Image (cartoon, helix red, strand yellow):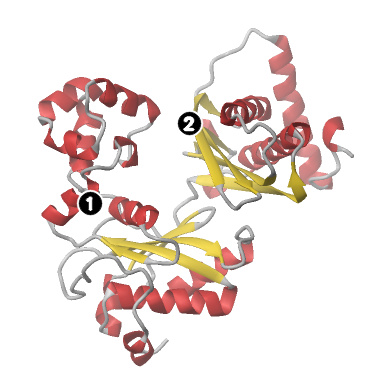
Amino acid sequence: MTAAAAAGAPAAAGAEAPRPDPAAPGRVVACLRLHPADGTPLGAEQYAGVLALLGGLTPAVQALPPEAALADVRGALRYFGCDAVRLAAVVRVRALALYGVDCTVGVAGNPMLARAAARAARPGGTLVVPDEPAAVRGFLAHKPVGVLDGVGPKAARTLCSYGLDSVGKVAAAPPATLRRILGVRLGREVHERALGIDRTPVEPGASARSIAAERPFDRDELDPVQHRRALLSLTEELGAKLRTHGPDGGRGQVCRALSLTVRCADRTTLTRTRTLAEPTAHSSALTATAYALYAGLGLQRARVRALSLRAEDLSAAERATRQLSLDPQDERARRLEAVTDRVRARFGPHVIARGTLAA
């Protein structure tokens, strides 16, 4: 990409805020949410291609599987002599032309704000949050506390019980009050993030914090039995990946949360997330949680086009603790999982399958 091409590209459709000055000090972080233009699930090759495209603009690119990425673009803005909206337009046009992938882009001064901007932007548009305290607070003020990094469902419920149900209210609360409610460390971090402060860097090559799998149906599926069969297949796949693929060559990973996304025939999507009782890669525990998430949606004969599961907040298995079980069935299931993983590693992933999935 040449400087002339970057400078001459049209502004991105859906630009929704003033453009930041590329010469301004501080970070300029872009978060891209990727979605194929034809409405199909994002493929691994498409995802890798867009990451490579971003890598041609800046070395600071962090993958956020399964369908997002972060990039620190302040150097690219100076090099090409353009603003973030125009650079986002160039990335979007090239991603569409080369890979058939559209991008929704959020731009801000740190990763947390960039992710929030990407979620708030119109599909295929660019939303810029100016790097000014007043603009940042105005952007965050009316958002629910759950958008803040580090605020999970339990912390959100605790804050809401005290009437602190929006980011603006948390930002206005005395820091000592937040420390008393949430604890010293988390209270301090939540107060900073409610003010729009996020000190985390964009980490090129960082280990994935989530893994995902999807099961599309050949036709719009009404049968709950087939829905549950697909969920069982997904949890078996995710469990095997977690147990056998650890970060930096480690002995596997565990997840702390599971997210279910249901894509319906009318193109609407329903997403639910649940934090697990303890970090795990045990397929039975993942299956029970996935079934509970599915039951909680109350689909009632919905026409389902695809189901996807994402294991979130991953960490190395050797650093996780597990409550010992007195149930011999559970212990036998875990030993059987270990044997099954070794057999699949040697002879292939499809050599062993549950009877309900063998058809």
> Of tags 1 and 2, which is closer to the observer?
1
Dot 2: element: helix
Marking on residue 66: none
Which numbered disc flags the more N-terminal residue, 1 or 2? Answer: 1
66 above or below 89? above
Dot 1: element: helix
313 above or below 57? above
Q: Is residue 346 left or right of residue 307?
A: right
Q: Is residue 241 left or right of residue 253?
A: right
Q: Amino acid at mark 1?
A: Phe
Marking on residue 319: 2
**Quadrant in the picture for the N terminus:** bottom left
Seen at 52% across and 56% down, the residue is 67
Residue 55 pos. (x, y %): 44, 72
Residue 316 appears anywhere in the view? no
Which residue position is annotated with label 1? 139
Q: Is residue 123 left or right of residue 286?
A: left
Residue 150 pos. (x, y %): 33, 36
Seen at 74% across and 18% down, the residue is 332
Seen at 54% across and 53% down, the residue is 66
Q: Alpha-carbon distance for marks 1 and 2?
A: 37 Å
Quarter holding residue 345: top right
